[in-house]
Amino acid sequence: MEKTSSKFFKNEIYENAVVTFSIKVISLFLSYFYLYYLSRNFGAHVVGIINIANSSILIASLFATLGFDQSILRFAGQFGANKTIFFEIYKKMGGFIFLSSVLITLFIFIFRNVLAHYLTKEEGNSLIFGLVSMAVFFLALTNLNVETIRGLLYVKESEIFRTFLTNFINLVLFFLLVNLIGFKLALPVITNILGIILTCLISVLFIIKKFHDKTEDANISVNLTSKEIFQISIPLFLVALANLISSYSPVLILAYLKTPKDVGIFNVAHRIATVTSFFLVSINSIVAPKISETYWSGKKEELKRIINLSAKLNFWSSTPLLLLFILFPKYFMGFFGKEFISGFRALMIMSFGQFVNAFCGSVGYLLTMTGNQNTFKNIFLLSAILNLILCFLLIPVFGFDGAAMSFSVSMIFWNVVSLLIVKKKFGFVTYYLPFLKKE
């Protein structure tokens, strides 16, 4: 019976992986076509400004989300079968996100001139940061919605809301408006924000519809207080914050110390190197709820099988592309324009970091979904601090190559340390490498 269950789950992973992979491929094509169009027609400076604006939206929305987008997955594993409790938790989280978003929106709007001066070197770009402030709540709520939908095991639908819909709306609106009114620097920011808002509204309607039929649980009260929700969410928020610092501090520090052109070149190298991460995200989007479900059900052997299968998928889906990026970096950078070729070393460095990330597997989700979120939080905070220190040491000397070094070293650090912690706590490891025997 256990073997039948395992086979069924394995088939489920492959089936969902194919669908989510297809969604991600389409989304990836849209985003990279958009990046190609901007870089070829408007150059590294414009790409850099847009990347700074988008990075600001992502960072601000992370603070507004407060880790709820990660903890909702944990609660899904425990309470997903009881829609009444799960919906009450979701509504509480949505209320807190609204309050935090208002404060962050006001902060960005008030200091928009300062942000424009230090990050883009042009105070005339304050309009862009005014627009950024409008998107905070909608992206934060979308982050919560995506993970709520995934927690309800609508994996394919969650992936549409996570990657496809915003990119699709942004692309359609951008090309429609650029043909009607011509290109303006704020236009890509406006269309991206409109895509975020529409995605948010559609995802809210989807969630309300899925929670609507819950009459069987109508008389059951919520067992979790707001304090208990925060106790689980805040460590995960700190993990997400550390992750964002590791991912986006090179962009913002590079913008502060160098120029938007440097940011643009780094952004292209980063986007190419991290193209393989969508394989890891696709697999994790399926695996994470299963990790929570099997662990809290006490099914250790099934948990181990899930981890081993995801490790193999991570490795074989990522390694071939990463090898190409490392061997032919000038070709891939030159595809976006001649001025981007100078970033070939940055591409090689970040591709190696992504290889280690793929090799280590779903180590982060294994820790956070099994009650070890505080341990992972501490690892990630150390990684973020290391990243910040390296950014300020290396970027002044090596520019975008220094940013790439900082990004990769911090990524390798948290993956390897987490791998060792998993071995100690669970007695097995998450990595996979052909011909390398696990101990």
Image: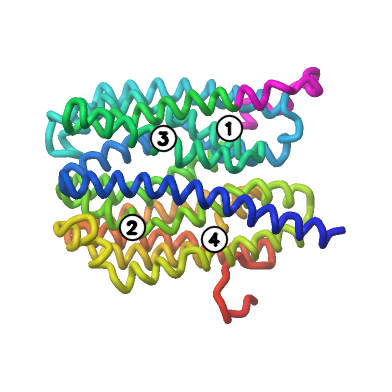
- Where, by quadrant of the figure, is residue 330 drawn? bottom left
Q: Earlier in the sequence, mark 3 or mark 4?
A: 3
For the residues marked 3 and 4, what is the alpha-carbon distance in whole angstroms? Answer: 32 Å
Q: Can you identify the residue that label 4 sits on?
A: 418
Range shown magenta: 207-232
Of circles 2 and 4, the one toward us is 2
- Where, by quadrant of the figure, is residue 38 drawn? top left
Q: Can you identify the residue that label 2 sits on?
A: 272
Main SS category, magenta section:
helix
Left or right: residue 263 versus residue 417 is left
Q: Can you identify the residue that label 1 sits on?
A: 230
- Where, by quadrant of the figure, is residue 163 drawn? top left
Q: Amino acid at mark 1?
A: Phe
Residue 140 seen in the figure? yes
Q: Are marks 2 and 4 in contact (CB under 8 Å)?
A: no
Q: Residue at x 57, y 49 (%)?
A: 19
Q: Secondary structure at mark 4?
A: helix
Q: Are marks 3 and 4 in contact (CB under 8 Å)?
A: no
Q: Position of residue 206 (x, y in %)?
A: 58, 27
Return the residue nearer the eye: 217 or 321.
Answer: 321
Q: Earlier in the sequence, mark 2 or mark 3?
A: 3
Of circles 2 and 1, the one toward us is 2
Badge 1: residue crowd in 10 Å (few <14, some 14–19, many ≥20) = some
For the residues marked 2 and 3, what is the alpha-carbon distance in whole angstroms? Answer: 20 Å
